[in-house]
Amino acid sequence: MFCFQCQETAKGTGCDIRGVCGKTEEVAKLQDLLVYTLKGLSEVIVKQNLKAVDLSSENHALIDGLFMTITNANFDDEALEKQINKVILLRDWLKAKGNEGNYNRAAVFQGGTRDELLEKAASIGVLSTKNEDIRSLRELITYGLKGMAAYAHHALNIGKESMEIYDFIYKALAATLDDVLSADDLVKLTLETGKYGVDAMALLDNANTSKYGNPQITEVNIGTRNNPAILISGHDLTDLEQLLEQTRGTGVDVYTHSEMLPAHYYPYFKKYDNLAGNYGNAWWKQIDEFASFNGPILFTTNCIVPPRSEEIRKRIFTTGAAGFPGCKHIDSDENGKKDFSSIINMAKTLPVPTQIEDGTIVGGFAHDQVFALADKVVDAVKSGAVKKFFVMAGCDGRMKSRQYYTDFANALPKDTIILTAGCAKYRYNKLNLGDIGGIPRVLDAGQCNDSYSLALIAMKLKEVFQLDDINKLPIAYNIAWYEQKAVIVLLALLYLGVKNIHLGPTLPAFLSPNVAKILVDTFGIAGIGTVEEDIKLFLEQ
Ligand code: FSO
Ligand code: SF4
């Protein structure tokens, strides 16, 4: 195996024996083969000039499959094998209907036994592209597409789709097989991926807000109540909605975990008095926090950490693109309905959650809410009460070096405001950094995809201050990344013209020196230094 798609990759270069995330060699190979099969399907669609609007099963298999290969989403070898075989069937069905073309191996290889699949996987992994710059760009695009697929998947669950996004994913995946394309061609495609990343985040924003309303400033309880409970993790709001409906009146509470926290900000969910609060912190702390939660846990997406004990494994359920061997997976029926009764029944038999924190945290500063406060924000900037905004969005992770973000937030001057989104927030959302004239110093817009809100806020400020360039705003970008959704967020920000983004705690291992240089020279991308140096640098910018 060889995988270097996330920030925690072994030795900062690549996992080659077993994933730091817990992915086994077998799962890593099946994931590689699934991506390869999707590339083959894409090539058939592109070469036959088919359009997403005339496809449906293929579109959904495409985004499901990509999502299943995101870091920490799906560790289930059987589910991955099933998806590979499904994609091969779809691919061959399209080939049989159209002209026999001159296809890449990815579009012609046949399935087989598990051993045959693994043998095939061994020859098509990341390292099979020998030129390191081409490899770097192909992977950068592929990872961006994985993030895009995750966002498109959530939007689809709410009934919103974009054929343009699907068409682009087919085009871009097929392009990663094309040996004729130069590094320059792939750089252009990388930037185009950012454009569709903006579109995917806009699609999901529209899906979320049209169904659940615009996020509002909300205080979320982080303590516990005295009822049996279910913890729901991941990003999918439709799963939360169904779980809340099914637990209503049963005496079972529901707590959000990690990236599900922002669900509390949506008006729609405020009617559920069984939505009790948020339990715990960012994904990687689940190792301890699931033990003290006591009740069942539902993963709607990543980030799953392999459970430490059989007792905890039995309490974990997965749905959608998430999966873990030995954990019950709950599929939807043909109408998208999921039956969560087994989780609810289990919750009733287990002890109530052990309280680990108390008090509240505040969030809900997505675009609409911030626009409503625009006058106050603009006055605060004009009067000098707010000197600078720091976009500190993205992900959290296990590395000790991420303490930097807590220290950075603590060390920021009191006349600065942090704009956050994603699970990165847990490094500073409980610090009590105070407020500036009633505006909290940490404004949480929501999940990682809600970085889109932060971009809209920046564009609104550019308009209000009548600037010709988004980079002239008093906004600095100090972003933490972990997995591939952060890659699409980054590409989207680059497409929107944001320069001088600092990315940490380490730069991606999949950037070759030449590709990294392009990002540095063209966009001013940089890593992080010490807190003191970086704050000085940012304040001088
Ligand atoms: Fe975090 Fe995990 Fe949301 Fe990611 S929980 S790390 S970027 O899945 O998607 O922010
Ligand atoms: Fe390693 Fe990250 Fe890949 Fe897991 S996802 S195998 S930790 S690089």
Image (tube, helix red, strand yellow):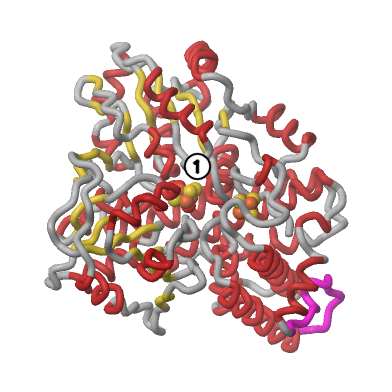
Q: Amino acid at mark 1?
A: Arg
Residue 344 occupies which quadrant of the picture?
bottom left
Q: Can you see residue 144?
A: no
Residue at image location 77% in from the left, 82% down from the top: 110
Quick one: quadrant of the N terminus?
A: bottom right
Cβ of mark 1 under 8 Å from ligand 2: the answer is: no
Query: Where residue 496 appears, x then y in whole percent?
Result: 55, 38
Which is more toward the observer, 110 or 488?
110
Q: Which residue is mark 1?
A: 398
Using the image as rendered, state which of residue 54 and residue 89 is in the foreground: 89
Reply yes or no: does residue 103 show up in magenta.
yes
247, 116: nearer the viewer: 116
Q: From this view, report whether residue 165 is shown above or below residue 479.
A: below
What secondary structure is the stretch in magenta mostly built from?
A: loop
Question: Residue 114, position in %: x, y?
Answer: 70, 80
Q: Which one is in front, 172 or 374? A: 172
29 vs 120, left or right, is left
Asked if residue 438 lies left or right of residue 382, the reply is left
Horizontal relation, residue 362 to residue 185: left or right: left
Query: Can you give x and y, in whole percent of width and height, for residue 201 in the image?
Result: 47, 51
Range covered by the magenta-colored residues:
98-112
Labels in figure, total:
1
Q: Is residue 44 magenta?
A: no
Q: Secondary structure at mark 1?
A: loop
Kindly identify the residue that appears in the image at 77 percent across and 61 percent down.
Answer: 125
Image position, residue 309 (x, y; %):
43, 62
